[in-house]
Amino acid sequence: MHDSHAWQAFSFVGAMMILVAYGGQQMKRMDPRSAAYNLLNIIGSGILCYSAFRPFNLGFVVLEGTWVLISVYAMMRNRRERPAD
């Protein structure tokens, strides 16, 4: 799968998820504290991090791995800060 069109499509989906979140936030259509925003970032950057292992690209692994960790942290923080109904 690594050299196929399917592999390219897989990484394209990851990039689009991050770009949808970013564009939505910039156009004030997505709240960066929302679960949807954070999930798009977590899944999208996770896909791209995974794809950076074949062929191995250290800079991209560090960038996307850090993006996953920060997005997970933000999601957990936002869940804790949410007022009880």
Image: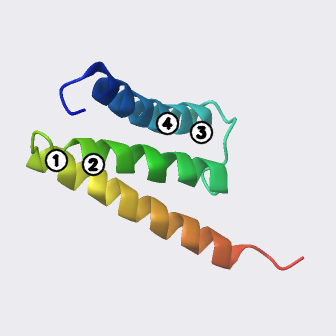
Q: Which residue is mark 3?
A: 25
- In the rendered structure, are the residues bearing label 2 and label 3 in contact, judged by CB atoms less than 8 Å apart? no
Q: Where is residue 55 shown, x and y percent of the image? A: 10, 39
Q: CA distance from mark 3 to mark 4?
A: 12 Å
* Left-right relation of 47 to 2: right
In which quadrant of the rendered image does the N terminus lie?
top left
**In front of the other: label 2 or label 4?**
2
Q: Secondary structure at mark 2?
A: helix
Q: CA distance from mark 1 to mark 2?
A: 6 Å
Height in image: 54 above or below 32? above
The 10 Å Cα crowd at callout 2, few under 14, some 14 to 19, many 20 or more, is some
Q: Nearer the viewer, residue 24 or 18?
A: 18
Q: Secondary structure at mark 3?
A: helix
Residue 50 disc label:
2
Q: Which mark is residue 53?
A: 1
Q: Mark 1, residues whose alpha carbon is within 10 Å: few (<14), some, or many (≥20)?
A: few
For the question of whether residue 67 can be seen, the reply is yes
Is label 1 in contact with label 2 (beta carbons under 8 Å)?
yes
Q: In the orientation shown, which residue stands out farthest toward the top?
A: 5
The disc, 1 or 4, on the residue closer to the chain's N-terminal end is: 4
| Quarter the C terminus occupies | bottom right
Mark 1 or 4, which is nearer the eye?
1
